[in-house]
Amino acid sequence: MAINWFKYSAPTTFYGLAGKLIPWFAIPAVILCGISLYIGFAVAPVDAQQGEFYRIIFIHVPASILSMFLYMIMAGYAALGLIFNTRLSSMMASAMAPTGALFAFISLWTGALWGKPMWGAWWVWDARLTSELILLFLYLGFIALHASIDDPRRADRASALLAIVGSVNVPIIYFSVKWWNTLHQGSTIKFSGTSMHIAMQQAMFTMLAACWMYAIVMTLMRVRSIILERERHTKWVTELPEVQQ
Amino acid sequence: MKKLSLPGLLVLVVRRDLVLAMRRRADVLTTLIFFVMVVSLFPLGVGPEMDMLRKMASGVLWVAALLSSMLSLGRLFSADYLDGTLEQMMLAPQSLSMLVLGKMVAHWMVSGLPLVLMAPVLGVQFDMSANALGVLILSLLLGTPILSMVGAIGAALTLGLRGGGVLLSLLVLPLCIPVLIFGTGAVEAISAGLTVVPHMSLLGALLLLALVFTPWVTAQALRISME
Amino acid sequence: MQVEGENGSGKTSLLRTLCGLMMPADGKIFWRGEDIKEADEEYYSEMIYLGHLNAIKDELSALENLCISAGVDGLEVDERQALQVLRRLGLKGREALPVKVLSQGQRRRVALSRLLVSDAALWILDEPLAALDVRAVDLMQELIAEHLEKNGMVIFTTHQPLLVPGVELRRLSLS
């Protein structure tokens, strides 16, 4: 088996593999998203305290979870690329960054939409919200650094180092923001206290699965274009049917 | 011929950068003037009510210190990069981390320490109490070296890039948030009559962590950027 | 060994790769039987590199520059010895001036002074003769001859003919 894994760690073979995998994740993503929307809007009951507004958590929570996980996975891939000098891992890291940033942004946006009716303000300096904002900054820093270095090898390695430093910092930042928050605000509205209806859970988890699928699809699609861009001068790329057209 | 010891090397690099800074004094002064200006602009923006200013003081001074240290970070490696001395440092038989640490220390003495010394004067403008001022200075003293050290990673990563200065701030500012929080938190704690020990210990812990890891990380970043 | 080749043929890249400043696309570089990636400390204490850039600080004097660059190389040089070296390179009377007031050739001499205080066995010199006048070129030939006599090695690039008396240079042509 080990040999097989190595085979797919070469961009050349991974390009084909990724192309075959995409539909296997894309179709479930659409289906799961549809199911989740149906459960979320038609089956799940109205919340006693929050009325209809709570339904935004069906996208808000998965987006937040994904934004955090993707950063860690991205840093992991970046570290692999830096340590073992595997090109594909670095490409995966840079392919994930925009999706992660998108989820962080969705999480902030939906958080604001939920906050207005619930807290009476678009933005509250809540610990989780603030950490999410800083996470978005970290993503943007990664993308900006990668984009401003012309040499792809240096870009990969420099942004990998940044991602690692960032991921070491994430717990410190989260802890400090939480501390800062308790220092300033008497209490924040706790959401976890309310018990969740089973349909609510179903809607949220199917959406979470859909988001994972979506993230994988986007990463694979993006990594395919990165491979093409980096290897555009090689023979196998010029021989590809989609390139020859 | 005598071989130079590791502490001797550290002293040599620090002295070199300090002498260079002294012969280019304008750079040091601009950072300091920027700091004073940013702090002085706040009352003009938010109004002269002393109560509000007193509350804001620590935050304003800390944010201004953060911004002015970003301003001077761009120069940390770029001059040495352009005239080839950085290249020679990478070829030195001694550890690059030690050389980097020397440059960090010198950078802090040139751009961080003057801010710390200037802070009491500015704090008085904001009518801070003597206690709060003392804590502010202590927190800056512990915190500004961290800014220099974490900033050095960013400076090394953005070496020789176009638009490096703005990019540098984009990378480094989010990483400096904990320092800002604990630094201002200490001043608020003393103003509220609470103990400052936890804040100061946390700042001290961050300083130690930075001291251990950032020189090595910066050296790696330099190797990536110089290749 | 003299490395020859047209502009852009890769002379500087070759020297930089030998120094470990650039990673070779393929293969490894060995020094005394060890990969320089592993034995970097030993390698760097026996190697001295002088590139296109002089690696001197405009604001510092020739003397300060020499002492500091030797310090970075891990050597402690006392003032008397440094002055001696600078005099030999024809910088007498200019030791204390900031190098920004010196001419290109004099600055190159300040950069070359590093060679004389170091005990490195391997000199890697990229265009050492750039901006040097006839007398300095002669001096350079003398220095290389002395270094070779001490069983040293020199790898250099140049566009000018460099004759070292009594030594047959090996030549490497890149094209």
Image (cartoon, coloured by chain):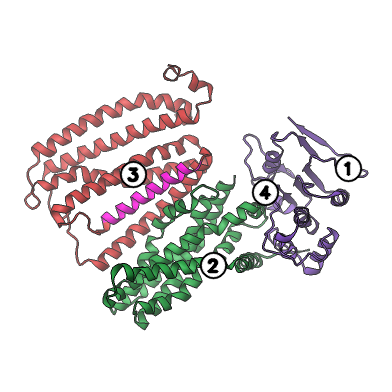
Chain colours: A red, B green, C purple
Q: Dot 2 falls on which chain?
A: B
Q: Nearer the viewer, mark 4 or mark 2?
A: 2
Q: Secondary structure at mark 3?
A: helix
| Magenta span | A128-149
**Which mark, by number, is residue C163?**
1
Establish if A101 lies above or below B28: above
Q: Are marks 2 and 3 in contact (CB under 8 Å)?
A: no
Q: Are marks 1 and 3 on the same chain?
A: no
Q: Nearer the viewer, mark 1 or mark 3?
A: 1
The Cα atoms of the two marked residues, 2 and 3, are separated by 37 Å
- Label 3 sits on residue: A101
- Tell me the kind of residue under disc 4: Ala
Report whether C68 appears left or right of B66.
right
Q: Nearer the viewer, mark 2 or mark 3?
A: 2
Q: Residues within 10 Å of mark 1 (few under 14, many from 20)?
A: some
Task: Report if residue C60 is visible in the image.
Answer: yes
Q: Secondary structure at mark 2?
A: helix
Q: In what quadrant of the picture does the N terminus of chain A appear?
A: top left
Residue drawn 61% across and 69% down?
B22
- Tell me the kind of residue under disc 2: Val
Task: Report if residue B202 is visible in the image.
Answer: no
The Cα atoms of the two marked residues, 1 and 3, are separated by 62 Å
- Label 2 sits on residue: B28
Residue drawn 69% across and 50% down?
C53
The x and y percentages for residue C136 are 84, 52
Q: Nearer the viewer, mark 4 or mark 1?
A: 1
The x and y percentages for residue C72 are 68, 59
**Which mark, by number, is residue C39?**
4
